[in-house]
Image (cartoon, rainbow, N blue to C red):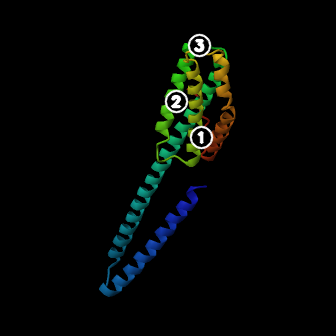
Amino acid sequence: MKWKPRFGEFLAGMIASAVLWCAYAIVAATIDGARPADWLGLVGAMLGTMMAIGGAVAIDRQKVANERRSSIREVLRAAVECVSLFDIAKSRFKHLTWKSDEAAIIGAEADQLSATLDRLLSRPQLTDGAINVGSGAMRLMQSIRRAANIFQEANGLDFGDRAFDVLIESVTLVEIVAVRAETVRVYHSLPKPKPQ
C-alpha cells in the first residue's frame, strides 16, 4: 500500500524530533532548574507543532493525488470517446458519398476531441501512461480527419473506399490505445470510463 511508507516516515520523523526536543529540554532543565509545568508546556507545544506540520503535508499530498487521478480519469474518458468515434467512422465512411454531411460532422467531432485531448495533455499532473493513451487517441482523431477530408475533394471516385482505407491503417492503434488505457486505469485503481 502507498500510505504505509509515508506513515512510517512521518512516525520516524515525529520520534526523532521528540528525542531531540527531550534532549534539549533535559539540558535546559538542568541548566535553568525547570518546574513540572514547563515540561508539560514543552511537550504540548512539541506535539502540536508536529501534528500541524504532519497534517499540512498529508493534506497537500492528498490534494496532489486527487488532481492526478482526476486528470487521468478525464484523459481516459476522452480516449474512450475517441475509440468510439473511430468505430463509428469506420462503419459509416465506407457507405458515404461525395461531400457527405455526415463525414463533415464526424470530422468536426474528431476536431473537437483532438482539441480536448490537446488541452488535457498539457496538464503537469499526468503520468507517462496517461500521456501515451492520450497521444494515441489524438492520432486516431487525425486519421478520422484525414478520412473525412477525402469526402471534400473535388474529383475522384470511391470516396467511401478511400476513406475506409485511411482508417484501416489505424485499426491496430485502436487496440493499442485500448490496452494502454486499461493498464493505466488498473494501475491507478480508477473506475471504467464510459463514453458520453
Report crowding for label 2: few under 14, some 14 to 19, many 20 or more residues within 10 A (C-alpha).
many
Type of amino acid at the residue the image marks with label 2: Leu
Tell which of 22 and 178 is nearer to you.
178
Q: Position of residue 179 (x, y in %)?
A: 67, 39
Tell which of 20 and 118 is nearer to you.
118
Type of amino acid at the residue the image marks with label 3: Trp
Type of amino acid at the residue the image marks with label 1: Val
Q: Is residue 39 above or below residue 67?
A: below
- The CA distance from mark 3 to mark 2 is 24 Å
- The CA distance from mark 1 to mark 2 is 14 Å
Question: Which residue is denoted by mark 3 in the rendering?
Answer: 98
Image position of 157 (left or right of 48): right
Q: Could you tell which of marks 3 and 2 lies nearer the N-terminus?
A: 3
Residue appearing at x 51%, y 35% in the figure? 117
Residue appearing at x 51%, y 23% in the figure? 108
Question: Which residue is denoted by mark 2 in the rendering?
Answer: 113
User: Any mark on residue 133, and which?
Assistant: 1
